[in-house]
Amino acid sequence: GQNIDQPTEMTATEGAIVQINCTYQTSGFNGLFWYQQHAGEAPTFLSYNVLDGLEEKGRFSSFLSRSKGYSYLLLKELQMKDSASYLCAVRDPRYSTLTFGKGTMLLVSP
Amino acid sequence: GAGVSQSPSNKVTEKGKDVELRCDPISGHTALYWYRQSLGQGLEFLIYFQGNSAPDKSGLPSDRFSAERTGGSVSTLTIQRTQQEDSAVYLCASSLPKTEQYFGPGTRLTVT
């Protein structure tokens, strides 16, 4: 089976740094994805990790530890527009389908 | 270039009616996925098409749900005899093999 956990909600202040954690227990693993979803919009791809370590892309970084079944998304220099839901998803090795967590709603305040 | 498009953007239907939701993937993307997102829930996988291979239907919640993909491009998700619990946003995504998925804007289905 697949089980993906992430916090339901987080709050942070503009300009700060926030880390959104994701833990997973899955029957197979072929990569972990992070997506951003603004209210009423489609999810948009942020990052992808298949090997252990940190992937950096501008203000966003994502980390993966396969042995611990753990990932985090790090957002730096937070902006108001970063207020959104952040979705962690694990890819199935056979069919490339994604299993999503329920998402973490991030609220950035001034 | 054009992204994934879906139609209609909103659909209100009466319980018991059939509905068809359409997805136009990104040109050249061989993989196409359907997901459902209910209020307060994560995205739920429904069905996956890859090229000419048999689709993975393991996520379809009941036999009222079916999908087809014609000519390896456009896909239609059909829900027969809709129920109120079918109310959700239905999202389509496409990708090249083993790469990130690109999502369409979704169809918000409301069953009254």
Image (cartoon, rainbow, N blue to C red):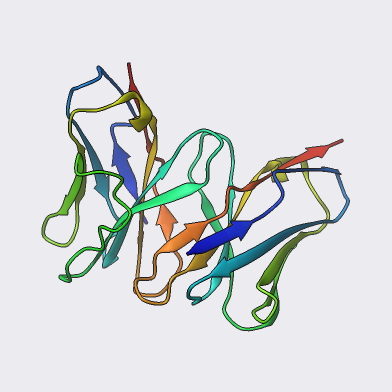
B107 to B111, vertically: above or below? below
- Residue displayed at 73% across by 60% down: A21
Between A105 and A41, the one nearer to me in the picture: A105
**Residue A67 screen position, x and y as percent:** 67, 82
On screen, residue A13 versus residue B62, left or right, reads right
| Picture quadrant where residue A3 is located | bottom right
Q: Which residue reaches farthest front? A: A1
On screen, residue B70 versus residue A42, left or right, reads left
Q: Which residue reaches farthest left? A: B71
| Picture quadrant where residue B97 is located | bottom left
- Residue displayed at 48% across by 75% down: A28
Between A13 and B89, the one nearer to me in the picture: B89
**Residue A91 screen position, x and y as percent:** 47, 69
A110 to B29, vertically: above or below? above
Question: Is there any visible trace of residue B3 in the rendered image?
Answer: no
Tell me the quadrant of the picture where the C terminus of chain B can be found.
Answer: top left
B54 to B12, vertically: above or below? below
Question: Is there any visible trace of residue A55 in the rendered image?
Answer: yes
**Residue A65 screen position, x and y as percent:** 69, 78
Between A12 and A67, the one nearer to me in the picture: A67
Tell me the quadrant of the picture where the N terminus of chain B can be found.
Answer: bottom left
**Residue B59 screen position, x and y as percent:** 33, 54
- Residue displayed at 67% across by 64% down: A23
B103 to A81, vertically: above or below? below
